[in-house]
Amino acid sequence: MHQMTQKEIKPLREDLLKKNNGICPLCETDIREGESCLDHCHKSGQIRNTLCKRCNSLEGQMKAKWIRSGVAKKVQFEVFLMNLSLYLNPDNYLPIIHPSHAARPRKLMKSSYNTLKREIERYNKFLARPIKIPLYPKSKRLTKRIKELFNQFGLDPRYYSK
């Protein structure tokens, strides 16, 4: 095992970066000049590779949180990451949606509301007791009453795209 000197860091970092074609092996993005880090194991001191600064920082933060969580007492970091990678595969997801991830109500387009409003105003000209037009909801959500009016006038409400 070779003990590096400070003078050897820059040439090794540049050589590894060149072998990686200037690409970070973790996030697969181009590493700009001066943005690479010579990554090493903080336990053994052994050099692993050259990473972009973001990935080098993230790897260190993840490992620190893994240690603080207490999981480090149960499983090695590398084993945990492999298990996590397999666990996060969408093929392993259950066909059930968590209640905190309920679909958000769609927002009614103001122009759609205005079309309904104009139709009601035209219709009201012929009535002794005009239909009361509800205000456009601040929440932009289709209220029960506005939905009833869309149905009554044979109109389809339009919604803002997400």
Image: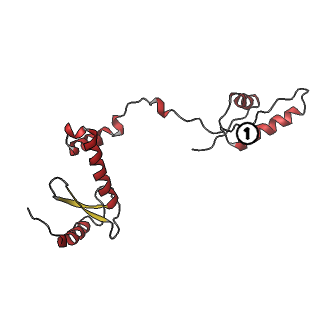
Q: Position of residue 88 (x, y in %)?
A: 33, 40
Residue 159: quarter of image:
top right
> Horizontal and vertical percent for residue 147?
70, 30
Residue, far front: 68
Q: Which quadrant does the C terminus fall into?
A: top right
Judge by depth and name the residue closer to the eye, 72 or 148. 72
The residue shown at (29%, 57%) is 56
Quadrant of the image occupied by residue 75: top left
Residue 18 image offset from top left, x and y in percent: 25, 69
For the point 20% across and 54% down, the residue is 42
Residue 34: give x, y in percent of width and height: 32, 70
Instruction: Give whichever of 161, 43 is nearer the camera.
Output: 43
Q: Is residue 99 left or right of residue 113?
A: left
- Compared to residue 31, the image places residue 80 above or below, namely above
Which is nearer the eye, 43 or 77?
43
Residue 113 horizontal side relative to residue 7, left or right: right
Colour scheme of the picture = secondary structure
Residue under circle 1? Answer: 113
In this view, 118 is above or below 9: above
Q: Residues within 10 Å of mark 1 (few under 14, many from 20)?
A: many
Q: Is residue 82 above or below residue 28?
A: above
